[in-house]
Every structure is written in structure tokens, then in C-alpha cells.
């Protein structure tokens, strides 16, 4: 079975994949719009890094609650509710026009990512319930490919779109795409699942937490998956646009082009590596990720040459994400899917939030962006040996 067979034989997967592409494509218009707005308003570095960090904070703070919400509610109803709230939060971004309204920007980013994290966890929990092991692996890889393709198309288009039509128009365009995604979701036909309602809310949170602590295999897999969260480059790319490449192009175009180039390799990686990735070869993928980021650090002296480094920095990322995520799902008892996925996102997003803030802090201390990127690459070399130890001890 391949990606096309899965799409052909499963209507729900076709719908979810279509919504994923539409919504993710639009998300980069508002994402690029937010960071372009911050640059245009001459926002301080702390505001840029905080905006990037806030994109991950909801999944960290609310993970225990989100997991129970996913398990207590019907998937279709939950997906439709979350995408509706996301639509409202993006529309409200059009009212942010000055630095004095940063508080509103931060609140809207937080709300949007709260509902987006619940949507994602509901979707991934649903896939684990309705797909076989092989189908699940393909679905996760397809998810990462669609994310990367929409990332590529979205970032490349968003920078040009904003340069011509403005930031507010980009927010409104994102709203229109979400409305289309909502209409697609109404066509889902999901089988009935017995919702876990026998225990109270806090008991379920406690059960999920202790289940993970007792299951060392899942616990280590969660941390190994979380290393991929360190590839959250929003702060780094925005700082490059604001300081290093500011004389070349507008901030929107620099942000758009850098992310689009990286996203091309994010999309190609899983397609090329899918047949080769397994427990033994994963060690080399972590190493490849680390050395790819280091290559990016060495090529940042020139905007166009840095594209080569960005391709190397993104080539292994999607495969690492999909494979480690699939392993977590495979090793999890199905009654804990929602909570384990929520805690997985909590740790993953914690790594992303920490690295976003740390990059801004290190730059504030005077470290060059090249050194910051180089240090990030060395972390993945450590992750490779962590995986090697884990594979020998637990698998």
C-alpha cells in the first residue's frame, strides 16, 4: 500500500488530508503576517521571540486537559468546534495595528494555538483508532508531507502576497480558507466510539500521567520525538530577516523565501526516505539532521548560498517526526490515545518554546546567529546517540 491507495480507499482520510492542506496553507499567511507585522512595527527582540514561544505554549500548559477533552468528546463535533474558534481568532488579528496592542496579539496567538492543538490531537487520536499499523505509518508520513507542501506553497505565496496586498488581507484570506475547511469537515463519516466517561476529569488526567511514567518505552519515545521540536526556526528566521538580510529584500519576502526553501526539503524527505527508515537507520537520520543544521550555520553568510544549508536542515525533519510519532502510537494502549498524544505534544512544544526563547536570549547576549544555529545542530548529534542507546535497551 502507498499514499495514493490510502487516499483512494478511505474517504475520511481524503477529507482530513484536504482540510489539512487547505488550513495549513492558509496558516502560513497569518503566521508570516504576524512576524511581518512585528518587523514593520519595529517590535523589540523579546516581542518576536515571545510571539514564537506563544505558538507553542498552549500545547504545553493545557496538554493534560486537552487529552481528556479529546477522549470525552465525539471527534467530528470537536474538530468542527475547534476550527470555528480558530477562524474567529484569526479574524480578530486584523485589529492589531500598533505596539500598544501587543497584548491582544499575544492573546489571539494563544487562543488560536489552544484550539489548533486540540484539533491536531483529536485528529491523531482518531487516526490511531481507525487505521491499521501500516496505514497509520503512511498516514503520519502523509501528514508530514502535506504539512511541508503546504508550508512550501504557503510561505512562498505569503511573502509575495503580503508584499503586494498587505498584512490584513493575508489574515482575511486565511479566514476564507478555514471556512472552506469547515465545509469539508461536515462531510466526515466517523464510526461511533465509546467515549471514556466513567472517571472524572482529574482522575483521567492522573491516570494518563502515571501510565506514561510507568511505560518507559513511551516515555523515552516522547523525548526522542520532542527533539524534532527544536527545529522551530521562527525566531531564527525572523532575526535573520530583521538583522542579517534586511538590506536585500523586505522582511516578508525574506521570511517567505527562507521558509519555502526549507519546506521543499521537508516535503521531499519522507518521500525519498520512507522505504529506508527503520529502527537501525534512525540513528543516521538524527545525525543527518544535526549536520544539516550545522551546514546551514556555515552558509548563513550569504542569503542565497544559505538555501543549500536550509535544504540540508530540513531533509530529515519530517521523517524523524513521522517515524517517532508512529512508534508512540504503536506502543500505546488505545484507551490512552488522547492523553498520550496530548502529553507527547506537551513535551514536543516545550522543546519548541524553549528553543524559541533561548535563541532570542542568546542573540540578546551577543552571540551571532551562525553560532546559535551551530549549537542547535550539535544537539541532534547528541539525540542520535540517545536513540542508539534507547534502541539497544528497549527495542
Image (tube, rainbow, N blue to C red):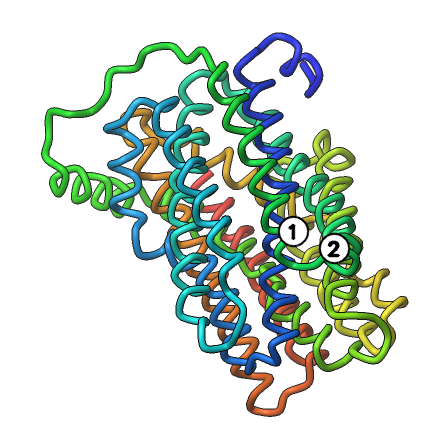
Looking at the image, do the residues carrying marks 2 and 1 touch, with CB atoms under 8 Å apart? yes
Q: Mark 1 points at which residue?
A: 170
180, above or below 208, in the image: above
Q: Which mark is residue 382?
A: none
For mark 1, does the 10 Å Cα neighbourhood hold few (<14), some (14 to 19), or many (20 or more) residues?
A: many
Residue at 55%, 73% (x, y): give it.
48
- Can you give x and y, in whole percent of width and height, for residue 49 in the image? 52, 73
Q: Farthest residue to the bottom: give it.
A: 366
Q: Is residue 282 above or below residue 7?
A: below
Q: Would residue 213 appear left or right of 217 to someone viewing this image?
A: left
Q: Where is residue 190 in the image (x, y as percent from the top left)?
A: 41, 13
Instruction: Return the residue nearer the eye: 105 or 370.
Output: 105
Which residue position is annotated with label 2?
Answer: 165
Q: In this view, does 84 lie above or below 194?
A: below
Q: In which quarter of the image is residue 254?
A: bottom right
Label 2 CA crowd tier, 10 Å (few <14, some 14–19, many 20+)? few
Name which residue lies at 60% across and 56% down. Answer: 31
Judge by depth and name the residue closer to the eye, 206 or 285: 206
Q: Which quarter of the rendering shows the N terminus?
A: top right
Dividing the picture into quadrants, the one containing residue 209 is top left
SS label for mark 2:
helix
At 27% from the left edge and 29% from the top edge, which residue is drawn? Answer: 71
Between residues 286 and 300, which one lies in front from this camera angle? Answer: 300
Quick one: label 2 or label 1, which is nearer the N terminus? Answer: 2
In the displayed structure, 132 sits above or below 369; it is above
- Residue 312 seen from this side: no
Q: Position of residue 386 (x, y in %)?
A: 51, 57
Q: How far apart are marks 2 and 1 (CA)?
A: 8 Å
Q: Is residue 17 left or right of residue 338?
A: right
Give left or right: position of 239 versus 61: right
Q: Where does the image place residue 391, in percent across and percent down from the top left?
A: 51, 44
Amino acid at each position: 500500500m502507498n499514499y495514493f491507495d490510502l487516499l483512494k480507499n478511505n474517504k475520511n482520510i481524503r477529507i482530513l488530508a484536504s482540510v489539512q492542506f487547505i488550513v495549513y496553507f492558509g496558516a502560513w499567511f497569518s503566521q508570516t503576517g504576524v512576524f511581518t507585522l512585528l518587523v514593520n512595527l519595529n517590535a523589540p527582540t523579546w516581542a518576536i521571540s515571545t510571539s514564537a514561544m506563544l505558538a507553542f505554549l498552549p500545547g504545553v500548559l493545557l496538554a493534560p486537559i486537552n487529552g481528556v477533552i479529546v477522549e470525552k468528546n465525539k471527534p467530528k463535533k470537536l474538530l468542527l468546534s475547534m476550527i470555528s474558534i480558530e477562524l474567529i481568532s484569526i479574524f480578530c488579528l486584523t485589529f492589531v495595528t500598533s505596539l500598544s496592542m501587543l497584548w491582544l496579539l499575544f492573546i489571539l496567538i494563544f487562543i488560536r494555538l489552544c484550539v489548533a492543538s486540540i484539533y491536531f490531537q483529536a485528529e491523531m487520536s482518531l487516526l490511531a483508532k481507525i487505521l491499521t499499523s501500516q496505514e497509520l505509518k503512511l498516514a503520519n508520513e502523509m501528514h508530514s508531507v502535506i504539512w511541508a507542501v503546504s508550508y512550501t506553497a504557503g510561505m512562498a505565496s505569503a511573502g509575495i502576497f503580503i508584499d503586494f496586498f498587505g498584512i490584513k488581507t493575508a489574515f482575511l484570506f486565511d479566514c476564507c480558507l478555514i471556512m472552506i475547511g469547515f465545509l469539508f469537515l461536515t462531510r466526515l463519516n466517523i464510526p461511533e466510539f465509546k467515549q471514556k466517561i466513567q472517571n472524572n476529569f482529574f482522575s483521567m488526567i492522573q491516570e494518563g500521567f502515571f501510565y506514561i511514567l510507568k511505560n518507559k518505552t513511551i516515555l523515552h519515545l516522547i523525548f526522542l520525538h520532542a527533539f524534532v521540536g527544536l527545529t522551530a526556526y521562527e525566531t531564527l528566521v525572523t532575526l535573520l530577516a530583521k538583522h542579517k538580510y534586511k538590506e536585500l529584500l523586505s522582511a516578508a519576502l525574506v521570511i517567505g523565501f527562507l521558509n519555502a526553501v526549507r519546506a521543499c526539503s521537508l516535503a521531499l524527505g519522507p518521500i525519498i526516505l520512507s522505504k529506508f527508515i527503520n529502527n537501525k537507520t534512525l540513528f543516521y537520520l538524527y545525525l543527518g539532521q544535526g549536520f544539516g543544521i550545522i551546514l546551514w550555520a556555515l552558509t548563513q553568510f550569504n542569503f542565497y548560498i544559505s538555501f543549500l544549508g536550509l535544504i540540508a536542515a530540513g531533509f530529515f525533519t519530517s521523517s524523524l517526526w513521522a517515524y517517532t510519532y508512529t512508534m508512540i502510537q504503536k506502543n500505546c494502549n488505545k484507551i490512552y490515545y488522547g492523553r498520550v498524544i496530548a502529553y507527547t505534544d506537551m513535551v514536543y512544544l516545550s522543546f519548541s518554546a524553549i528553543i524559541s526563547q533561548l535563541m532570542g536570549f542568546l542573540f540578546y547576549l551577543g552571540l551571532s546567529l551562525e553560532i546559535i544555529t551551530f549549537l542547535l545542530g550539535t544537539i541532534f548529534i547528541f539525540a542520535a546517540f540517545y536513540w542508539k542507546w534507547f534502541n539497544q535497551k528497549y527495542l
